[in-house]
Each structure stands twice: as structure tokens, then as C-alpha cells.
Image (cartoon, rainbow, N blue to C red):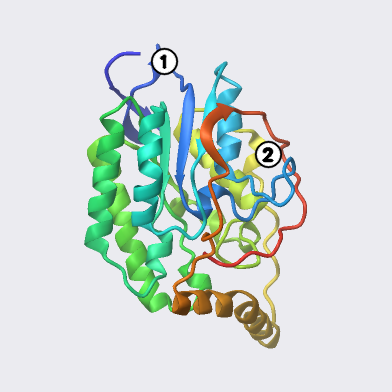
Amino acid sequence: MGSPAPVTINGSTAKIRRYSGDVVRWGSFVAVGDSFTEGLDDPDPANPGRFRGWADLVAAALAGQQPGFGYANLAVRGRLFQRVLDEQLPPALAMGADLVSVAAGGNDVLRRRFDPDALAAGLEATVGKLRATVADVLLFRFADVTARLPGRRLTSPRAAVLTRAVTETAARHGALLVDVAADREFENPALWSADRLHLSTAGHHRVAALVLTALGVAPDPRWWSAPPRPPLRPWPAARAADLAWAGRHLAPWVRRRLTGRSSGDLVTAKRPNLSPVHPPPLRGGGEVREHPLG
């Protein structure tokens, strides 16, 4: 191993701790966060009723390069930033993983109460603790979902605050920054599920390709593929679709906000411990089962 060395990957400089000569090697990966990292809306072909997602795909790719590779995914849908830190950071630190991804804060942006200072301070402390160990850290600039959701005038500035906090924290601590926001292909509705908030299978494959590229690992080239953009609907059809979406997805989300409930109240982490990874199929999975927004 050795002391952290500056490495330029995909145009940005990060201090990579796990390396062997010019080749970066990780023996374990822990993913923390919310539905984005849990894998909604990418059905797991090996586990019906569960989700796969970009983190599982990245873990499988890294496992192919390192014998004995271990992977844990602690992410739970609907989690707010502070709860992610309270519940997932301690076990992530205890596992002593070589690589840790932190992706949270999106649910906070959509809530009535949003404390940008607390979020920025929490992110700073979290990455600092992780970098004080042997961990390399992955952070994300999220794609903008506010254009497809109501209340954009409120949520868009909040999303910008989160993006700025992530960018500045990554620079201060030498973390790897995965810039999903810069990829214009995520403006394609086909990369998003019917709820307009979570990624589709194609979206998760593309995020996995971005992550591996940021890590200096060549992804499967098919993961860059995106379905054709759906044709624009006439105004009446588009408004009818908006009404159907509001009834199926938005109204239940509002009810949960009013009653203090979350879509993840009865959900536990899908991989709570470091364990070996079995590479999943490239494509596949059944229909996405109904689940509530975050």
C-alpha cells in the first residue's frame, strides 16, 4: 500500500490510497446512502422482489479484478442525510473497507425543512472520518431530477446547495467525484423509472459506467447504451400522464410526509455485512414492483 498519492483520474485529482504501482486495487467496497444506492428501480434478476443498482454492478466489476473482494450495501430508501450518518456510517467505519461511497441528501432536498449548513457540516465530518482511515471515498454530483417534479422553484436551489457542498468537500479531502450531473444523457426520460425520481435499469448501468471510469477501471461498453428518447407527447396526452403520475406516486408521497412516515420504514440493508460478490447478468430483471417514492 503506502501513503496517499495524488492520481489524476478522468480529469480530476484525488488522493488514492489503494494502489500497486500504477494500478489501483481495492479489496472491499461499502456503499452507504438511500434509494439511489439501494438500487431502485433496477430489479435484481437473481433475487426477485429486490433491487440491484449501480453499486452492485460496480462491486461485481471490481471483484473481477481482486480475489477475495468483499462488498456491503447499507443503503435504505427514503433515508434522510442525518439518519444515513447515524445508522450507516458507524458500521461502514467498523468494516474498514478500502472504498466507501457516500450518496445522500436528495431526500432532504424534497422535504419541507432543509438545513443546508447542517448537511454541509455532516458531509464534511463524514468524509473526514472516512479519509482518516484507509478508505478511498466516492462522492456524487447528482443528476437534476427537479425538472420532472413539482415545486422546482423551491427544490432546484436546494439541489444546487447540495451539489456545491459535495464538490467542495471532495476537493478538500481528495475524494473521487462522480459527476452524474454533467452527463446530459440523464435528460433522457428512458434512464428514469415511471416514478420520475429513481433510475431505470439503463440509468443504473450508466451510473455504474461513470463510477468505474472515475475509478480508472474500464466498464463494460454496453453499460453506456441508452434507450432511444421517447417521442414528445401532445399537450393533452402529457397532462393526462402528469395526472396519472400524481395519483399513483405523488399523492402517496404527500400522505407519508403528513403522517411522518417513510418508504423505508420497514426496509433493512440488503447487504449489511462484507461478503463475496457473484457477478450478475449484464441485463435483465422482471417488472419493477410498485413501491412508494422516497
Residue 59, placed above or below residue 80: above
For mark 2, does the 10 Å Cα neighbourhood hold few (<14), some (14 to 19), or many (20 or more) residues?
Answer: few
Q: Residue furthest bottom?
A: 236
Looking at the rendered structure, the kind of residue marked 1 is: Asp
How many numbered discs?
Answer: 2
To which residue does mark 2 refer?
222
Q: Which residue is at the front of the view, 261 or 98? A: 261
User: Where's residue 155, x and y in %?
Assistant: 38, 71
For mark 1, does the 10 Å Cα neighbourhood hold few (<14), some (14 to 19), or many (20 or more) residues?
Answer: few
Q: Residue furthest front?
A: 266
Residue 163 can be seen, yes or no: yes
User: Where's residue 240, x and y in %?
Assistant: 68, 85
In the image, what residue occupies the spot 52% across and 79% down? 255
To which residue does mark 1 refer?
22
Quadrant showing the N terminus: top left
Residue 173, placed above or below residue 267: above
Looking at the rendered structure, the kind of residue marked 2 is: Arg
Q: Residue furthest top?
A: 21
183 relative position to 226: left or right: left
Q: Earlier in the sequence, mark 1 or mark 2?
A: 1
